């Protein structure tokens, strides 16, 4: 329960709690306690689009409300994800920060700021997870015998929808944490996910521009919605 409350009340506190839990638990997901990013693709041309910022090539691909990780693809209705890769000369290093990225949707004047990965945890879902079937057969038979069948006198309200077990939630969150774009001084190439808050349907997006403004320079990439 402590971890659940932390997820709601603080982004970086959340990440810290996940790391601490990962170090203390004995599950196979325990070592996943840092952001490492995704494996960079072979070349920038293997992404949807790419452009040059100084000596660095920035590549990107829009993933919509999907959150792809090596362990599986999750989803979030509150945010959109962009898989980003940065490439440079052999041995080149760069200071990475998600704050260097912003996203302009449908030509709006003010672009969206990138958000820390932990913020998406509250809306993160695993489409492949199926809740166990609720034991409704007995209650239904009693209701039918009573003659009401529609929540009459003495009827009980339906049970709340089942939630994903906490250990599965933690594993899912750790997979997303690991797949997010690494930050700090890094050797190129690097790749990972960055997130932007967008609750709308992707079908209503007509134009997308990913803006990079960081140590390498400034460049705008036109993405396919």
Image (cartoon, rainbow, N blue to C red):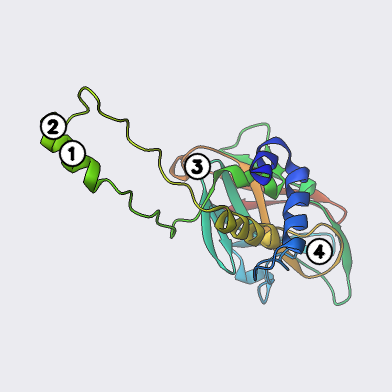
Disc 1 on helix, strand or loop? helix
Near-viewer residue (110 or 130): 130
Q: Name the residue under label 1.
A: 142
Disc 3 on helix, strand or loop? loop
Neighbour tally class for label 1: few under 14, some 14-19, many 20 plus, Cα within 10 Å: few
Spot occupied by residue 122 in the image (x, y as percentages of width and height) = 59, 42
Spot occupied by residue 158 in the image (x, y as percentages of width and height) = 32, 35
Q: Distance between the residues labelled 3 and 1?
A: 50 Å
Do the residues bearing badges 3 and 2 touch, measured as CB atoms within 8 Å?
A: no
Near-viewer residue (197 or 61): 197
Residue 56 marker: 4
Neighbour tally class for label 3: few under 14, some 14-19, many 20 plus, Cα within 10 Å: some
- The mark that comes first in sequence, 1 or 4, is 4
Residue at 68% in and 32% down: 110
Work out whether residue 201 can be spotted.
yes
Neighbour tally class for label 4: few under 14, some 14-19, many 20 plus, Cα within 10 Å: many
- The mark that comes first in sequence, 3 or 4, is 4
Q: Name the residue under label 3.
A: 205
Q: Is residue 160 left or right of residue 158?
A: right
Q: How far apart are marks 3 and 4 (CA)?
A: 28 Å
Do the residues bearing badges 3 and 1 touch, measured as CB atoms within 8 Å?
A: no
């Amino acid at each position: 329960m402590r971890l659940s409350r932390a997820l709601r009340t603080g982004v970086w506190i959340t990440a810290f709690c996940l790391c601490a839990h990962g170090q203390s638990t004995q599950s196979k997901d325990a070592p996943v306690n840092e952001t490492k990013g995704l494996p960079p693709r072979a070349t920038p041309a293997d992404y949807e689009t790419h452009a040059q910022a100084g000596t660095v090539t920035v590549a990107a691909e829009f993933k919509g409300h999907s959150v792809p990780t090596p362990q599986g693809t999750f989803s979030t209705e509150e945010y959109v994800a962009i898989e980003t890769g940065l490439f440079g000369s052999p041995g080149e290093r760069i200071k990475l920060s998600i704050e260097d990225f912003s996203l302009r949707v449908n030509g709006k004047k003010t672009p969206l700021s990138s958000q820390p990965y932990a913020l998406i945890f509250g809306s993160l879902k695993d489409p492949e997870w199926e809740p166990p079937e609720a034991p409704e057969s007995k209650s239904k038979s009693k209701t039918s015998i009573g003659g009401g069948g529609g929540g009459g006198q003495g009827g009980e309200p339906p049970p709340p929808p089942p939630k994903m077990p906490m250990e599965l939630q933690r594993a899912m969150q750790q997979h997303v944490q690991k797949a997010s774009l690494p930050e700090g001084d890094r050797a190129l190439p690097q790749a990972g996910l960055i997130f932007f808050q967008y609750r709308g349907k992707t079908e209503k997006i007509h134009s997308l521009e990913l803006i990079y403004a960081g140590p390498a320079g400034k460049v705008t990439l036109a993405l396919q919605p």
